[in-house]
Image: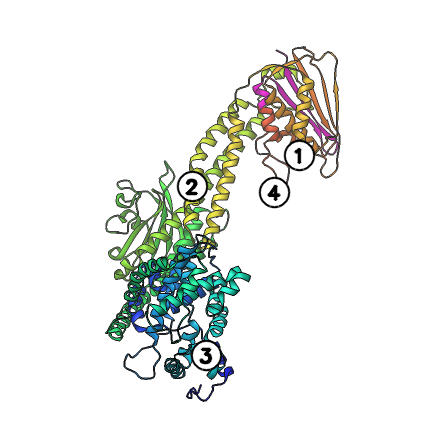
């Protein structure tokens, strides 16, 4: 914008457009020299520059704007920029302050506005405003009044930024005529600095009360105050401005005689003696802030240049370090892709040796090694082990090898702890059995660990020995992940072996129909299937299997949880979560097995049969989420009380009723329950009858086996009838089932009366 002498009025619209383009005020070199060294600290904290920010209008506006844009709340009472800065990200504070424009000032230049003088005046007004607010009313926020005083002349600062020579001439004319700066402004540019300041405050989203003070601090505040109490802070700033001018601290750019401070002070109940106390209180504080900002420094530009030069060196050094970190991150990114692709490629149900084959092939390709051999620790007592050999071009084969007779399968220095060692003589027993020639001089060994347990060993030819230190941490991470996955596969295989052995024993016992003698005498009914195998032997087997499986499952679940909590990558986190979920699912199966194998010992007492049936129907309703069960209960008159643990028998009968309800599928069918004395009169016979889907002969034979169910995949675990039979047997009763496919099922229970 062209600047002419004040006698030729400048277009008001030109001024408004020029001012509206300001994004923020600029700061002085002497101030920048104070905060730049603090910004370049590696562990920069916003609180280290809060005192400088709170003393410079440009910095204050910059941070207030950042606070507003980030949505950081400022309390209505005890307005504090320093507290709000603690809530801002340090890097954003640093970037905002660094982006602030620094405008040099020459103390000898003619026709240049006195920017330092105006800043000293603003500091004085700020300190006076806080003292007045603290003195006049405990209800007024002194800190808010301070910032209102600090920013009250930002309209003048904006004019200096956009039209410095014109503002200088306006100020000089005001000095010559001993007039107010506002009067000359209105005459030559058609707009006053108070209105300019208001518009900028609104643009920069400054607090409303501060904006009000910027706009009204030259108005007839004593009159407005009576009608608009919210303008009280503007009156405080007006009094503070008057005291600052009387104290001749800095230069406000106005040279008229300010209204006597005593007149304004009277509005706040402050007398002459109290004004003197305020003067004495703030003078030292003002001088401290002037020193803090270096406003009286004689070599400000030199210090600024030195600070910027040191910052440039510091940032160049940091840029070099970041470049190195970026290269490391790029390498880590590639390693992450290797790990991710391996984990995603592992299929559910894959055997340990298939996983080992997959991993060894990927290892050779990613790390660009020579030949690779990965072998798994053999099962206890076995003289053979499984191994994968990867030769050239990722060609792999699975082989069976003999374990060494005179040396450990796992070298001692990598058993239970990670290290990468030279093969040397450790692989002699292995290499003698392989058709592939390994170069032992450059072959390295690394353990595949699950915690402190070595699952296997990977041996690989390192083509570039000097790369070992670069990749050692990546080797360690990859090997440990492989160890975790392989351990899960091995434990899954053990669990399957237990299950298969368990099922085989159960089937053998069922086929042989090892019926208890007392049951043979009482229930010799060929058309029925009795609980004819030894539940005690079956329970003992179940308990042993459960105990064997619980510990490895707990380790798998715990380690997966720890790894998932520490993992930042969502893909890997999801895989670890799947491992944990499946381990927890297996643990629940173990709990069912333990409940079957080791239920609490019965605590029998005399109980009426009608009470047992009623409680069982209620429990079955809750389990099947059925409000009213379609049941028909018939109890003979001479039925005795039974001597059993009522809680256990109620649970058993409820399971049987649930099965009866589910046999109807989606439709609702009736469940008939009858109770009558046994022929021996020492037992009560309960019959639970349905007309649902029924069972064929093969299903009937397996009906009370643990985990058996005729339902498709996704079914429940099939413990209902097995658990019921177990509880009834513990209470010295018996259970038998008669069923015909498509016609229904009848479960007969005999319960002792004594």
User: What is the C-alpha distance between the residues marked 3 and 2?
Assistant: 79 Å
Q: Is residue 42 above or below residue 658?
A: below
Q: Of the residues under marks 1 and 2, which one precedes in the sequence?
A: 2
- The nearer-to-camera label among 1 and 4 is 1
Indicate the quadrant containing the N terminus: top left, top right, bottom left or bottom right. bottom left
The residue under label 4 is 713
Instruction: Report x, y in % for residue 156.
Output: 42, 75
For the residue pair 656 and 386, the one nearer the viewer reads as 656
Tell whether label 2 touches label 3 (CB within 8 Å). Answer: no
Crowding at dot 3, Cα within 10 Å, few <14 / some 14-19 / many 20+, comes out as: some
Measuring 69% from the left and 18% from the top, which residue is drawn there? 610
The residue under label 2 is 558
Indicate the quadrant containing the C terminus: top left, top right, bottom left or bottom right. top right
For the residue pair 232 and 351, the one nearer the viewer reads as 232
Tell whether label 1 touches label 3 (CB within 8 Å). Answer: no
Q: Of the residues under marks 3 and 1, which one precedes in the sequence?
A: 3
For the residue pair 97 and 556, the one nearer the viewer reads as 97
Q: Is residue 592 above or below residue 356?
A: above
The residue under label 1 is 624
Q: What residue span does the magenta drawing correspond to?
A: 727-754
Under circle 1, the secondary element is helix
Instruction: Report x, y in % for residue 291.
Output: 27, 66
């Amino acid at each position: 914008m062209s600047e002419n002498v004040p006698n030729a009025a400048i277009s008001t619209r030109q001024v408004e457009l020029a001012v509206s383009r300001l994004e923020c005020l600029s700061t002085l070199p002497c101030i920048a020299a104070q905060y730049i060294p603090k910004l370049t600290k590696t562990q920069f904290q916003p609180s280290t520059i809060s005192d400088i920010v709170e003393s410079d209008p440009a910095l204050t506006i910059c941070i207030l704007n950042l606070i507003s844009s980030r949505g950081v709340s400022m309390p209505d009472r005890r307005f504090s920029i320093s507290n709000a800065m603690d809530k801002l990200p340090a890097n954003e504070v640093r970037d905002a302050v660094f982006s602030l424009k620094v405008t040099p000032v020459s103390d000898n230049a003619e026709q240049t506005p006195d920017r330092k003088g105006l800043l000293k005046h603003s500091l004085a007004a700020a300190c006076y405003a806080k003292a007045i607010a603290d003195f006049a009313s405990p209800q007024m926020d002194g800190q808010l009044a301070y910032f209102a005083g600090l920013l009250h002349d930002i309209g003048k600062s904006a004019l200096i930024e956009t039209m410095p020579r014109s503002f200088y001439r306006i100020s000089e004319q005001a000095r010559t005529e001993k007039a107010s700066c506002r009067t000359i402004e209105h005459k030559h540019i058609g707009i006053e600095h108070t209105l300019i300041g208001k518009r900028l405050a609104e643009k920069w989203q400054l607090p409303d009360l501060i904006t009000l003070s910027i706009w009204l601090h030259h108005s007839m505040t004593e009159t407005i105050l009576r009608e608009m109490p919210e303008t009280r802070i503007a009156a405080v700033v007006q009094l503070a401005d008057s005291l600052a001018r009387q104290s001749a601290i800095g230069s406000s750019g106005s040279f008229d005689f300010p209204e006597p401070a005593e007149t304004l002070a009277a509005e706040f109940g402050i007398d002459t003696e109290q004004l003197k106390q305020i003067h004495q209180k703030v003078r030292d504080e003002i001088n401290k802030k002037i020193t803090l900002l270096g406003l009286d420094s004689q070599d400000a530009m030199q210090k600024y240049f030195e600070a910027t030069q040191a910052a440039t060196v510091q940032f160049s050094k940091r840029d070099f370090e970041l470049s190195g970190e970026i290269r490391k991150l790029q390498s880590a990114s590639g390693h992450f892709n290797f790990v991710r692709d391996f984990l995603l490629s592992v299929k559910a149900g894959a055997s340990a040796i298939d996983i080992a084959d997959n991993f060894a092939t990927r290892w050779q390709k990613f790390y660009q090694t020579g030949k690779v051999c990965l072998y798994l620790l053999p099962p206890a007592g076995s003289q053979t082990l499984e191994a994968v050999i990867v030769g050239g071009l990722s060609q792999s084969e699975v082989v069976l090898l003999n374990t060494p007779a005179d040396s450990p399968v796992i070298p001692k220095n990598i058993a239970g702890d990670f290290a990468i060692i030279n093969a040397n003589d450790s692989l002699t027993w292995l290499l003698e059995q392989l058709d592939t020639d390994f170069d032992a001089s450059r072959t390295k060994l690394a353990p595949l660990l699950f915690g402190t347990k070595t699952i296997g060993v990977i041996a690989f030819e390192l083509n570039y020995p000097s790369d070992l230190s670069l990749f050692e941490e990546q080797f360690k991470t990859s090997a440990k992940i492989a160890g975790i996955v392989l351990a899960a596969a091995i434990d899954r295989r053990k669990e399957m072996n237990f299950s298969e052995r368990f099922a085989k024993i159960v089937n053998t016992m069922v086929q042989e129909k090892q019926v208890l003698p007392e049951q043979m005498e009482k229930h010799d009914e060929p058309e029925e299937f009795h609980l004819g195998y030894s539940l005690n032997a079956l329970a003992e087997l179940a308990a042993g299997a459960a105990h064997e499986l619980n510990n490895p499952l707990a380790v798998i679940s715990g380690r997966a949880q720890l790894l998932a909590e520490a993992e930042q990558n969502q893909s890997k986190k999801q895989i670890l979560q799947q491992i944990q979920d499946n381990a927890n699912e297996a643990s629940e199966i173990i709990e069912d097995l333990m409940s079957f194998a080791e239920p609490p010992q019965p605590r029998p007492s005399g109980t009426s049969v009608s009470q047992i049936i009623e409680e069982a129907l209620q429990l079955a309703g809750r389990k099947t989420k059925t409000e009213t069960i379609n049941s028909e209960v018939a109890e003979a008159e001479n039925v005795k009380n039974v001597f059993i643990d009522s809680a256990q028998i109620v649970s058993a009968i409820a399971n049987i009723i649930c099965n009866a309800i589910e046999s109807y599928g989606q439709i609702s069918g009736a469940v008939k329950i009858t109770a009558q004395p046994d022929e021996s009169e020492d037992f009560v016979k309960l019959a639970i009858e349905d007309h649902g889907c029924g069972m064929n002969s093969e299903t009937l034979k397996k009906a009370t086996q643990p985990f058996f169910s005729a339902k498709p995949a996704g079914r429940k675990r099939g413990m209902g009838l097995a658990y019921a039979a177990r509880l009834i047997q513990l209470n010295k009763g018996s259970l038998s089932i008669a069923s015909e496919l498509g016609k229904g099922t009848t479960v007969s229970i005999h319960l002792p009366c004594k």
